[in-house]
Image (spheres, rainbow, N blue to C red):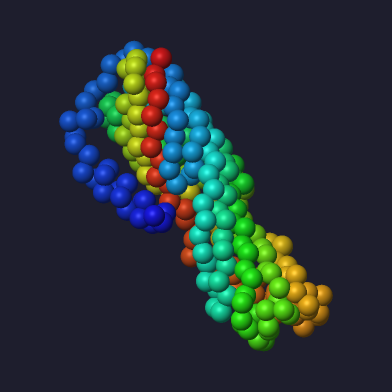
Amino acid sequence: MTLKQIAWIAGLLMASWPPAVCHAQDTRGGVTIAAAGGSLGIGPEVGFRLSEIVGVRASATFLGLGHNVDVDDINYHGDLKLRSWGANADLYPFRNCFRLSAGFRVSSNRIDLVATPSEAVTVGQRVYTPEEIGTIEGKVRARRFVPTFTVGFAKNRENGFAWSLDAGVMLHGRPRTEDVVATGELASNPLFQEDLARERGEIENEVDNYKVYPIVQLSVGYTF
């Protein structure tokens, strides 16, 4: 399942969520310890409901996923490594479980790309054989400090079982491609290095549309 499909399903769930679930919550409790999982990864989350209207949260998330990326003639295997931590300020405008949230994440998210062509392919502006290319490797990263905005529901005011569901966006900007290298016979050839630099630009153009990362997180825990 892709991130776009996850975001679509979460949006459908939130749009059809029964209004009756969001009744006014008790004023007891406040500190919630939970496990969260979703498009940001999986990890611990700690929240504190300061009042009926305001709350804060902090979390750290980790996950690894595999995804293939086609760039012109070359098919790359991508390992998406999600590693980030951050905090949110939550606003409960109706004094119930509906919330609007804004925050930040410090991200080490990256994609490790690896391609080993089995036939002649175009790199940059020229065609090269598999022996001349060998294996091409590279990394794709986004900005390290990024803002987040979500809308969701949370039962976290009463003592006992707690849950939340949030969906929104992380504005991580244009991803950048780093450390694109090859291991073949022409790895140090100046002309091949020029084409490898062009290939790096083509990879960046391929991921240029992913400046906004979807957030869909479900958490389950306990409020004290």
Q: How many marks?
A: 0
Q: Residue at x 56, y 60 (%)?
A: 78
- Relative horizontal placement of residue 32, taking residue 125 as reference (left or right): left
Q: Which is nearer the eye, 7 or 145? A: 7
The answer to whether any part of residue 19 appears in the image is yes
The quadrant of the rendering that contains the N terminus is bottom left
Q: Residue at x 41, y 56 (%)?
A: 2
Percent of width and height locating residue 115: 62, 68
Percent of width and height locating residue 77: 56, 63
Quarter of the view holding residue 141 = bottom right
Q: Residue at x 41, y 14 (%)?
A: 224
- Relative horizontal placement of residue 94, taking residue 200 as reference (left or right): left
Q: Judge whether 31 appears above or below 92 on screen.
A: above
Farthest-out residue, bottom: 126
Quarter of the view holding residue 62 = top right
The answer to whether any part of residue 201 appears in the image is no
